[in-house]
Image (cartoon, helix red, strand yellow):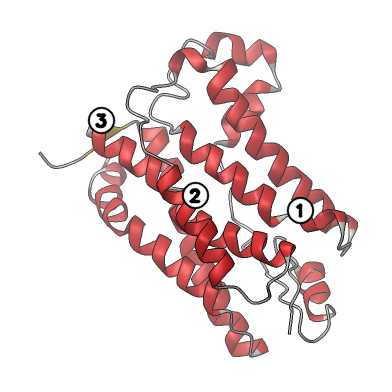
Amino acid sequence: MRRGRLGRPPGTAALQSCLQAGPGRRALVYCPCSPPPASSLLLALSLSPSLSFPLSVSLWTTGISGKSQVLFAVVFTARYLDLFTNYISLYNTCMKVVYIACSFTTVWLIYSKFKATYDGNHDTFRVEFLVVPTAILAFLVNHDFTPLEILWTFSIYLESVAILPQLFMVSKTGEAETITSHYLFALGVYRTLYLFNWIWRYHFEGFFDLIAIVAGLVQTVLYCDFFYLYITKVLKGKKLSLPA
């Protein structure tokens, strides 16, 4: 049976809408603390010319992987294309539009507005090695062989590995700026909280989505080494640097 998706941050109203979605709907509830796919500071600064101009020559995009941000833009676009076919609520629709808009705005900031500070020489991960396998897997392993369902599944698979270009960039430079470290930690916590969300839903709703759970576990595992370095170095006021 094909099951739909809600795909919005939860709250009381959001949770009620999930429960009212009806049997058989995969109403994914996203964690309220989930950050946009890139630094909200960059987005806010881009909307304020008086602030963004002096910072355009600073280190705001240094250490940020543009390729990871492109992958996040693809993730949210593929996941939320159902906003044209499935109307849940005005809030739900607005959040989908905001996620997509923030994703592409961030890509524009990195490759255009703050291009001078973007370190493309170290952002060299071959993203086709992530996009092609996850696309093939989405065709082979999904809940229902329909266009929107395949796109949703593809977005789940791709999001689980979209951070790899960023982690690869950190491994090449051997270190990360403090603000970059905080951003990566926030992303990691966001994905880890997904797991608690699935546990909560299984316990209280009897809902279980193996695809989403496995994808969440994969990405959490990818962050484990970074979490260790963040806790042992950044939280102690040191700059994150990889062991020699």
**Looking at this view, is 92 or 181 the one in front?**
92
**Number of residues whose C-alpha sits closer than 10 Å to that of mark 2, classed few (under 14), some (14–19) or many (20 or more):** some
Query: Disc number at residue 81?
Result: 1
Q: Determine the residue positioned at 42% across, 34% down.
A: 179
Residue 239 in sight:
no
Q: Which residue is labeled 2 in the image?
A: 131
Q: Is residue 40 above or below residue 196?
A: above
Q: Quadrant of residue 184?
A: top left
Q: Is residue 10 left or right of residue 200?
A: right
Mark 2 or mark 1: whose residue is earlier in sequence: 1
| Callout in the foreground (3, 2) | 2
SS assignment at label 3: helix
The kind of residue on which mark 2 rests is: Val
Mark 3–mark 2 distance (CA, rounded to whole Å): 24 Å
Q: Is residue 112 above or below residue 41?
A: above
**Number of residues whose C-alpha sits closer than 10 Å to that of mark 3, classed few (under 14), some (14–19) or many (20 or more):** some
Q: Which residue is labeled 3 in the image?
A: 173
SS assignment at label 1: helix
Q: Determine the residue positioned at 47% across, 12% down.
A: 116
Residue 110 in sight:
yes
Mark 3 or mark 2: whose residue is earlier in sequence: 2
